[in-house]
Amino acid sequence: MAKNYEKLFSEIDIAGLTLKNRVALAPMTRISATDNGVVTERMEKYYTKFAKGGFSLIITEGIYPDEKYSQGYFNQPGIANDIQAASWKNVIESVHEQDSKIIAQLMHAGALSQGNIYQDSTIGPSAVKPKGKQLAFYKGEGEFALPKEMTLEDIQDVKNSFVNAAKNAKEVGFDGVEIHGANGYILDQFLTDYTNQRTDEYGGSTEKRVKLLVEVTQEIRKAVGEDFTVGIRISQAKVNDPHHKWAGKEKDAEIIFSSLANAGVDFIHITEPKANEAAFEGSSVTLVDLAKQYGQVPVIANGSLENPDKAEQMLATGHADLITLGKGALANQDWPNKVKHGEPLEEFNAQNHLLPIADVKEREM
Ligand SMILES: Cc1cc2nc3c(=O)[nH]c(=O)nc-3n(C[C@H](O)[C@H](O)[C@H](O)COP(=O)(O)O)c2cc1C
């Protein structure tokens, strides 16, 4: 007998989108586009599977917004030019046919770029070599390159590329965009004290370190208008520094979330390794709680929520409006339908569930 997950399966109007339930697909890079960043038929099938499986909203993998420094990984899809943008249309139509919505995640890799067909070098807020090693999973090896410190012109270029990508996303029919401000990529590099050592208006205090995220949000909003959903993803952890915590703790959270809300975001998507655990040592509040408290906009929670009881609790008492699943969704592409019907869930297993889409056999798609 299926449990009654009342919150999980209730409809919600979030940020201008009507969603049939509160389970969305988390953004996941699958390096399965063509060498030129064009979407493939396999990707269309891949995204359609989740929509068919009951996810009310699909957030795409990180898509690169320009033909300069933004691409992070070879075979990552782009939305920088007309051909790339148009190649998303089949995915969007197919997801819509399943009564799901789809949002494009716009991602500029900055200093974490390890595969770019347009540039050999990388940029970042300061010339600080990223911690850790390139991601072998995405075909990188060795240390990251030392990035070039961005000029004000480079910063303007980055803003323009986000705006151009958001306009392309709107034009080809996406239901919204998510600005990737998390996980160590360029906007998070500005937000992070040790990667941003600038002494101009984009570095120093938390207010100054969040300035580029605010400006990108404001400029996208100006370009796409009020009736297009624009959200942002924020984290403390990074792909190359999973234990990072904000030094200013709750005060930082207040500055970051209130600034982004004032800039006009429709939602804040929080990702933490465990979304239901306290954000900082010595405190009991989660980052989701803080986003809700200081942002006062719908909050999406991500991180180890694949157990449906936990997911329901995050919605019922944890201040989240929607949850996203990453690994739990890869293991169960029909997670919402299975949970609704009380069917058993499969445990995530990297060997079975993490293959790039291009390497997955047709019958397993
Ligand atoms: C294969 C893979 C690719 C990912 N790519 C992205 C990405 O492109 N953009 C992003 O914001 N997060 C990315 N993530 C992080 C996920 O969105 C999510 O935050 C993470 O898997 C934790 O959620 P989970 O516990 O539900 O798996 C990726 C995760 C995985 C497993």
Image: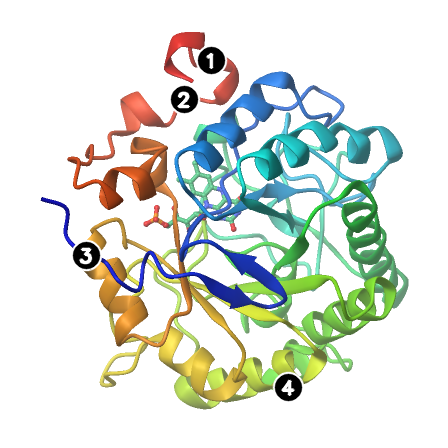
Q: Nearer the viewer, residue 196 or 298?
A: 298
Determine the CA span between mark 4 and mark 1.
44 Å
Determine the CA span between mark 3 and mark 1.
37 Å
The amino acid type of the residue labelled 1 equals Asp
Determine the CA span between mark 2 and mark 1.
6 Å
Q: Cβ–Cβ below 8 Å for labels 2 and 1?
A: yes
Using the image, tell me which numbered label, if any, was put on residue 359: 1
* Secondary element type, mark 2: loop
Determine the CA span between mark 4 and mark 2.
40 Å
Looking at the rendered image, the disc whose residue lies closer to the viewer, 4 or 2, is 2
Seen at 73% across and 36% down, the residue is 78
Using the image, tell me which numbered label, if any, was put on residue 355: 2
Seen at 69% across and 51% down, the residue is 147
Q: Position of residue 167 (x, y in %)?
A: 83, 52
- Quadrant including the C terminus: top left
Q: Position of residue 34 (x, y in %)?
A: 69, 19
* Secondary element type, mark 4: helix
Determine the CA span between mark 2 and mark 3.
33 Å
Seen at 85% across and 70% down, the residue is 222
Image quarter of residue 6 = bottom left
Q: Position of residue 106 (x, y in %)?
A: 67, 50
From this view, report whether residue 275 is shown above or below residue 171.
Answer: below
Using the image, tell me which numbered label, if any, was put on residue 207: 4
Q: Nearer the viewer, residue 301 or 271?
A: 301
Q: Which residue is mark 3?
A: 4
